[in-house]
Amino acid sequence: MTALLEITDLWAGYGRQQVLQGINLHVDEGEVAVILGANGAGKTTTMRAISGMIERRGSVLFQGTAIGAASPDHIVHAGIAQVPQGRGTFTDLTVEDNLRAGAFVRKNTNDSIDTDIRQWFEVFPRLAERRLQKAGSLSGGEQQMLAIARALMSKPTLLLCDEPSLGLAPIITQELFDVLGRLNAQDGLSILIVEQNANLALRIAHQVFVLETGTITASGTPSEIAQNDTVRKAYLGF
Amino acid sequence: MPITITESSAQHWALRFVGVATLAGVAVYFASGAAPSTLGKITEACTLAIAAIALNLLLGFNGQISLGHSTFAGLAAFTAGYSVNAWHWNPWLSLLISCAVCFAFGMLVGLPALRLKGSYLALVTLAVAFVWPTVARKFLNQTVKQSTLTGMKLKPPTWTGLANNRADRATFLFWLSIALLIVAYGIVRNIRKSRIGRSLVAVRDNETAAAVMGVNLPLTKTITFGISASLAGLAGWLTAAQLTTLDENSFSILTSIKYLLALILGGAATLAGPVVGAFVYYFVDNLLKTNAPKWNFLPGQLSNGPVASFLLGAVVVAFVFIAPTGFVGLIKSQTRKIAIVVPRPLRHKAVAEASVENSKSP
């Protein structure tokens, strides 16, 4: 298995404060990698560093190309899409226009974009019902689905999900993870998820990394991680 | 149940045609019958509408506030007035140059906007608007060596068949302002309906999400500032075409406030809003200024004082309560009960696949 995303000794932060202190992680092609971490561990910072939103040092290789110094739009062009924390839907645009906005980097004809919108409407029928509603009028769960569909409109090779379960009812979270698992199993989409909800995340993960105060303290397959006593106490609660 | 009309369907085109024909009819009616002074007022309202459209692109669709748009208009007006009078440039060439100068200056003012938001950006652009009169004064004193700058005295071209007298000049400027208004509206409408337009709104609604979708934030924001400034320049050039003299007070901070008021009254982030708002603002203001001094039914001091501005303020406050989304928002929410326009349905899969196949085959 070749690594799709390979991060070596990545440092990042805000101003003089370094949040990430030399993390190493990798996402293999066609796999789901999960970063577990508590509040303030640096999960969102990791996402922002991969997407090029903040200053960072270290090596980030994506499909063998160095993207550690690239700008956010170059990184999206390279094939990495992010579902930002807290959804980040464009509240004043309709559901359909949100999806069209997600296809910003694609220079294709409207026809192929329409085809993809139809496809996501099949995956998320509730978005189809709300096609012409403003995204701001959607429920939290629907907005999260919209955010995922919108990110996928750029046809990424790697999808980054920043705490998709944040602020959602358990049943909705379950549904979302089912969809993410299906996207990985059926379409071979590689996904990197950061989560606090270990139970759900471990179910679809192939690789797990535990992030604590800016460093990776443990990594392995879900079963290995589940046997790790500290992780079990901290995240699984038994 | 309201009637549903699909966007770009036959009914929608019919509706658009009726709308455009009505507006054109009104314009022709005024042009043929009205006195030069009335035409002059409409020309001024159109100029205000162009500036409000410019501000709408920046504030309404991209979420960047500017109180410095009067300066862009002033810069264009001075560039046009000076180049035509001192260097004997062709006025139409001066239009292009003025807009280009404003584009460049707008990009420059847009640079701090990359780091500033909301009230901080308002402050920076406010500073630009405050500095302008001083700069203009210095320019008049040192370069022009007069207290005022002469306007362009734009003559109707011969192909129009209009003579160079007051009435014909008014007719010419009236049609010119309408043409430029249509151009400005067309530019902003096409931007808004395009992929780029969605990215502008995306940046306004959520910068982070827009960036991780591949929108280049610094480029998008500065270019939008530049385009908006050059459209404001269009309004400034048109002002220089109307006025016989310009001075440093022609484009004070109050002018910026006027642009902002017209935009908010009409409805920011709607296409028709700035146009409707500009006409409503201009004519309510005009009506009050002409008539209010005659009204003596107001209590005490008010009937002697600046009644017009007081009443205008009251009207604006009242209006913000009645229609918080602006005039166009109010009209939309009412007409929605009768008819709604929905976007065209998604193109069908089979059709889409067929066309992809076609594009692949050589």
Image (spheres, rainbow, N blue to C red):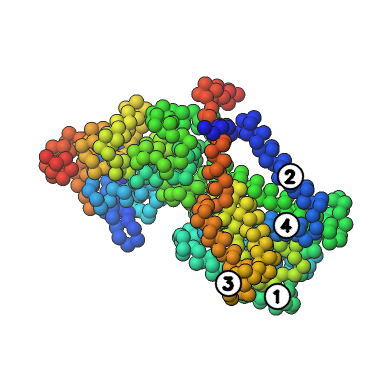
> Which kind of residue does numbered mark 1 sit on?
Leu
State which tag comes first along the sequence, 3 or 4: 4
Q: Which residue is mark 4?
A: B43
State which tag comes first along the sequence, 1 or 4: 4
Judged from the image, the secondary structure of the residue bearing numbered disc 3 is: loop
Contact check, label 1 and label 4, Cβ < 8 Å: no
> Closer to the observer: label 3 or label 4?
3
- Asked if marks 3 and 4 fall on the same chain, the answer is yes
Separation of residues labelled 2 and 4 (CA atoms) = 15 Å
Q: Which residue is mark 2?
A: B24
Separation of residues labelled 1 and 4 (CA atoms) = 26 Å
Q: Which residue is mark 3?
A: B299
Separation of residues labelled 1 and 2 (CA atoms) = 40 Å
Residue drawn at 61 percent across, 45 percent down:
B189
Q: Quick one: quadrant of the C terminus of chain B? A: top right
| In this rendering, position of residue A235 left or right of residue B135 | left
> Closer to the observer: label 1 or label 4?
4
Query: Residue A2: x and y, percent?
Result: 32, 34
Query: Residue B70: x and y, percent?
Result: 62, 64
Q: Which residue is mark 1?
A: B140
